[in-house]
Amino acid sequence: MTVLVFGSGGPLDPILSNVPGVVVLSNQTADPRRPADCADLVEDVSPVAVLYLAGCRDADIAQRDPGFAQAVNAGTPQAIAATCARLDIPFVFQSSADVFDGRLAMAYVPSDTAEPITTLGQSLWSGEIGVQNTHARTAIVRSTWVFGQGDSQIFAEAGIMRDGSVWRVPQGIEAAPTPAFDLAAALLTMAATLVNQPEKAGIYHFAGDQNITLAGFAQRLALASDDAPSQIETAAARDLWPYPRVISHARLDCRTTQAVFGLGRPNWRAALRKTLVTQKSERFVA
């Protein structure tokens, strides 16, 4: 009984790779730019469920190459979802809060209208629409600021710019960081649940238990970094990028996820402290 994961090379891959019965395909093994090949792999393995994490999460890459972002965030997951629909197996698609415009004064619920203002968000929203229209037994999971041990993806995802020993952080950005370990466990729980309870398909939010400004999170993240900054500067987002790159408020309402799957919001502060202790211990051993 296999759960097939199309990995992203990000923080979830090594966690999921250590779970019995889970097969994580790297981008080298399953190139997300080749939708037909990825769909064929699902056919070959015939898993009990499929997780798609292989999309683009870097807003700068999406801005430079929107065709690539559209392909890996929408075209390929839709092709995989079509194969999953034919084989009658559940499909879980990792998305993010970037599908919103970030202007809502309260936390976004899954049913709120998606109005992406970034190229990255537009490609993810296209992916959400495509997989939902293709396969009924699909769970779309939106998260924010996913971090894990030794991972640098969080900088690209959250909008922290590193210039030598200086980190530059956009002002007025707020969300809840999400520990990679807890998100990986949540995705597997959703996939396993959909095997026997297809009626639980839908859109869900999963994020940490407390919102924080990006500047505040950067301060904490610096403590866990292998390359701690000498200074953290804040600036208006428009002064950092000539195009929309991050949304101001990415607060997610996760109550539906709790009600349907029994998945509470993880304590990201404890997870970050654990990451800090582990990384310092590994550096000491080395």
Image (tube, rainbow, N blue to C red):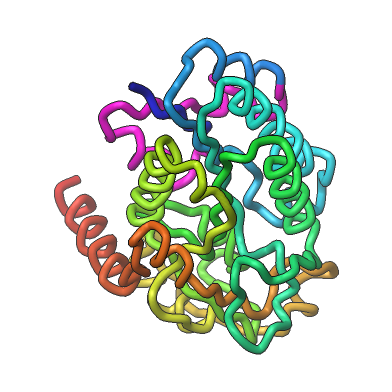
Q: Is residue 181 visible?
A: yes
For the C terminus, the quadrant is top left
Q: Is residue 63 left or right of residue 211?
A: right
Residue at left offset 57%, top offset 39%: 137
Q: Which residues are magenta?
A: 8-35
Indicate the position of residue 46 as horizontal and vertical percent values: 48, 16
Q: Quadrant of residue 224?
A: bottom left
From the viewer's perspective, is residue 279 above or below residue 35? below
Quarter of the image where one finds residue 23: top left
Q: Considering depth in this image, is 182 or 170 the residue closer to the camera?
A: 182
Q: Residue at x 52, y 83 (%)?
A: 213
In the figure, is residue 139 to the left or right of 103? left
Q: Is residue 180 above or below residue 4?
A: below
Considering the image in quadrants, where does the N terminus appear?
top left
Position of residue 62 measured from the top left corner of the image (x, y, whole percent): 76, 50
Q: Is residue 37 above or below residue 281?
A: above
Q: Position of residue 280 (x, y in %)?
A: 22, 59
At a point 45% along the width and 27% down the height, the residue shown is 4
Magenta span main SS: loop
Q: Is residue 9 magenta?
A: yes
Q: Name the residue furthest top.
A: 44
Percent coordinates x, y for residue 264 in the rendering: 34, 67
